[in-house]
């Protein structure tokens, strides 16, 4: 096992980060485009926000884009730590884009438009794995072992060791940041301001 600044990093079977990523991390994220993958559900989006806020704090010059299920876009709109929200539709035969080929083509065009260098796959399933691969990002970080499912590990280039099974999702998300050498304390809140219409955000 390798370590980064004393933190658990990647499994032995996975190569180290390429030099150009390390250089951009050291330069506050300058010329770095980060794609966050967490499509839903609403509670898990909220649990992922502290990790993403830490990314923004450590990499102020990076461009941070979050790919989310279209119905949950409203939960992230206006968040100060995001440069862009990419709302991706789930595949449904009766909704556009119709047909699997058109759906994959739409996802590919949207994801590649981001020009991501680095993917943080907080979701860890088949769909997020495919999304990361379609983005063409050279570095795609996810979980190993029981923390991923549906073959997600076959789509990530760098995998963080699974660790204990009984761990909060917030802590599980922080493992991806520790592998990049990003400080995880103090842990921020989600940074959300619901304003006067919380029912719209929560879908009530």
Image: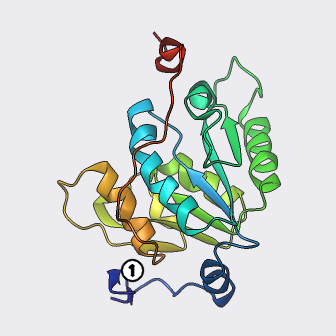
User: 121 and 99: which one is in front?
Assistant: 121
Q: Which colour style is shown?
A: rainbow
Above or below: residue 64 compared with residue 199: below
Q: Quadrant of the rendered structure where residue 4 is?
A: bottom left
Q: Quadrant of residue 91?
A: top right
Quarter occupied by the C terminus: top left
Percent coordinates x, y for residue 157 in the rendering: 55, 73
Residue 132 is situated, as x and y percent measured from the top left of the image, at 62, 58
Q: Quadrant of the N terminus?
A: bottom left
Look at the picture and state if 84 lies above or below 120: above
The residue shown at (51%, 54%) is: 52
- Residue 112, image x and y in percent? 79, 56
* Residue 136 visible in rendering: yes
User: SS at mark 1?
Assistant: loop
Question: Which residue matches tag 1?
Answer: 9
Mark 1 Cα shell of 10 Å, populated few (<14), some (14-19), many (≥20): many
Point out the residue furthest to the top here: 204
Point 77% across, 55% down: residue: 114
């Amino acid at each position: 096992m390798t370590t980064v600044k004393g933190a658990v990093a990647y499994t032995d079977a996975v190569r180290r980060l390429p030099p150009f990523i390390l250089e951009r991390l050291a330069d506050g994220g300058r010329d770095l485009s980060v794609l966050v993958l967490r499509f839903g559900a609403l509670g898990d989006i909220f649990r992922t926000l502290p990790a993403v806020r830490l990314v923004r704090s450590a990499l102020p010059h990076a461009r941070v884009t979050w790919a989310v299920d279209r119905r949950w876009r409203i939960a992230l709109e206006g968040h100060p730590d995001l440069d862009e929200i990419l709302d991706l539709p789930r595949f449904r035969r009766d909704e556009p884009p119709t047909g699997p080929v058109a759906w994959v083509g739409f996802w590919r065009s949207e994801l590649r438009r981001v020009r991501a260098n680095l993917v943080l796959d907080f979701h860890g399933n088949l769909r997020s794995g495919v999304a990361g691969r379609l983005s063409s990002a050279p570095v795609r970080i996810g979980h190993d072992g029981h923390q991923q499912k549906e073959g997600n590990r076959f789509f990530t280039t760098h995998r963080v060791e699974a660790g204990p099974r009984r761990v909060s999702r917030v802590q599980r998300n922080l493992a991806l940041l520790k592998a990049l050498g990003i400080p995880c304390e103090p842990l921020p809140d989600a940074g959300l301001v619901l304003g006067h219409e919380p029912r719209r955000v929560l879908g009530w």
